[in-house]
Image (cartoon, rainbow, N blue to C red):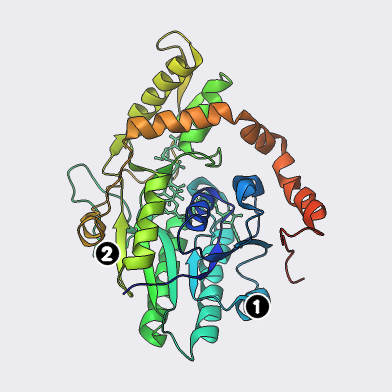
Amino acid sequence: MQTAASRILLTGGSGFIGSHLTRHLLASRPQPQIVNLDLLTYCGNLSNLEDCSWQPNYRFVKGDICDEALLDQLFLDHEFDTVIHLAAESHVDRSIVNPLEFVRTNVLGTASLLQAARNHWKSSYAGKCFYHVSTDEVFGTLSDGQEAFKETTPYSPRSPYAASKAASDHLVRSFQESFGLPTKVSNCSNNYGPNQFPEKLIPLCINNILTQKPIPVYGRGDNIRDWLYVDDHVTAIDLILHRGRVGETYNIGGKCELRNIDLVRQLCQAMDQELGRPPAFSEGLIRFVEDRQGHDYRYAVDCSKVCLELQWQPSVSFAQGLRRTVQWYLENRKWVEEITSGAYQTYYERQYSLKLAGPGQIKGSAS
Ligand code: NAD
Ligand code: DAU
């Protein structure tokens, strides 16, 4: 079924994947109206969408997906036909330190959004779509040689992050089954690219290599992840949103399994070349450190369904994507410096006071 997606509530648009997706959709034809609802937690950064902030079809709202009154007001004001839900706590290490924050945002937040969509759409679900962006981590961990995750693989989450995302996926499907809410879900592997918060493996390593700090590799570095350049994830979401079947789940993956240690060595080489350092200079910074608790060994995604049904393919090779990512971080050092210094968190106040009287329509929450 084709989805028009003309009035979109997009959550988490100031984060890593959400900002790339918002920019992509804003440039599409016919142009949709997009409201980006984002709480600007530690990983939300308004500067990620600075170039889009003045577009007449874009509006930023600072607010919490758990705030039912705000959601109600937004649905009333904007008459959304589409929700694309990305807002989440997304870092596994943080979920081990603070699981409850993940339950609140990822489980309660998703339930609140589903409930708002149901309340406002129940008179007619025609032309409506609730698209939930999820992760391959819900499927658990694989051993060497074990078959890649399929859409039918039973869920077996092993970290509080993965468990909270699994719960959110179940809630989405339960609203489809119980109330007929038209939903779509995709489960994607590890993304990388510009604007990724520097707590995740690739941007953390880039920053440490640049500043010649130790590169922490968990355990022996033999864990395996499947890597996808963020723009390829965005094109898959676009295809599924507009042409995917309602009620279906699609796995998205990069067809690019790498051991962490091999990835880190490749990154060291790419950085040494870019920085004109001697070969193998940065590999000397690698340190094997205490392993992550419950560290999933291997993820691999069978994405043949989206490839066959919607003719999607990852288009950026890992070597190309890594080069682009490294170059972006080197050309945008200020972006990381503002995170390190905390300056990025004052961006909202600066933008808000500057633009209050202008046409940019940056709004505060309902409170
Ligand atoms: P991110 O951490 O970079 O961004 C998350 C965004 O959500 C931030 O802008 C944050 O401010 C916002 N947010 C957090 N709590 C909120 C709340 N209560 N209300 C409103 N906004 C809130 O995350 P990301 O890496 O861009 O991931 C986006 C989505 O994609 C997540 O749902 C994640 O589970 C999923 N995903 C990520 C990857 C990956 O490799 N990064 C892979 C597969 C799926
Ligand atoms: O698989 C999709 C998931 O990928 C997304 O759902 C998550 O939101 C995203 O954060 C990512 O989860 P990972 O835990 O795989 O990503 P992270 O970058 O934290 O770690 C990647 C691998 O690198 C993992 O095996 C742990 C290891 N690692 C990570 C860090 C931060 C290290 O060895 N050292 C580190 O400092």
Q: Which SS class for mark 2?
A: loop
Amino acid on which the number 2 mark rests in the picture = Pro
Taking the view exactly as shown, the residue that stands out farthest to the front is: 30
| Residue 94 position in % (x across, y down) | 55, 48
- How far apart marks 1 and 2 lie (CA) works out to 39 Å
Task: Examine the rendered structure and indicate whether residue 301 appears above or below residue 290.
Answer: below
In which quadrant of this rendering is ligand 2 seen?
A: top left
Task: Examine the rendered structure and indicate whether residue 58 appears above or below residue 90.
Answer: below
Amino acid on which the number 1 mark rests in the picture = Asp
Question: In the rendered structure, which disc, 1 or 2, sits on the residue that comes first in sequence?
Answer: 1
* CB at disc 1 and ligand 1 closer than 8 Å: no
Instruction: Check disc 1: other Cα within 10 Å, few if <14, some if 14-19, many if 20+.
Output: few
| Residue 118 position in % (x across, y down) | 50, 83
Q: To which residue does mark 2 refer?
A: 154
Question: Residue at the spot x=45%, y=89% of the render?
Answer: 124
Question: Residue at the spot x=28%, y=40% of the render?
Answer: 256
Question: Residue at the spot x=51%, y=34% of the render?
Answer: 203
Task: Examine the rendered structure and indicate whether residue 179 appears above or below residue 251.
Answer: below
- Residue 43 seen in render: no
Q: To which residue does mark 1 refer?
A: 77
- Residue 110 seen in render: yes
| Residue 58 position in % (x across, y down) | 61, 60
Instruction: Check disc 2: other Cα within 10 Å, few if <14, some if 14-19, many if 20+.
Output: few
Residue 137's label in the rendered image is: none
Quarter of the image holding residue 9?
bottom right
Quadrant containing the N terminus in the rendered view: bottom left
From the viewer's perspective, tell me whether residue 239 is left or right of residue 80.
Answer: left
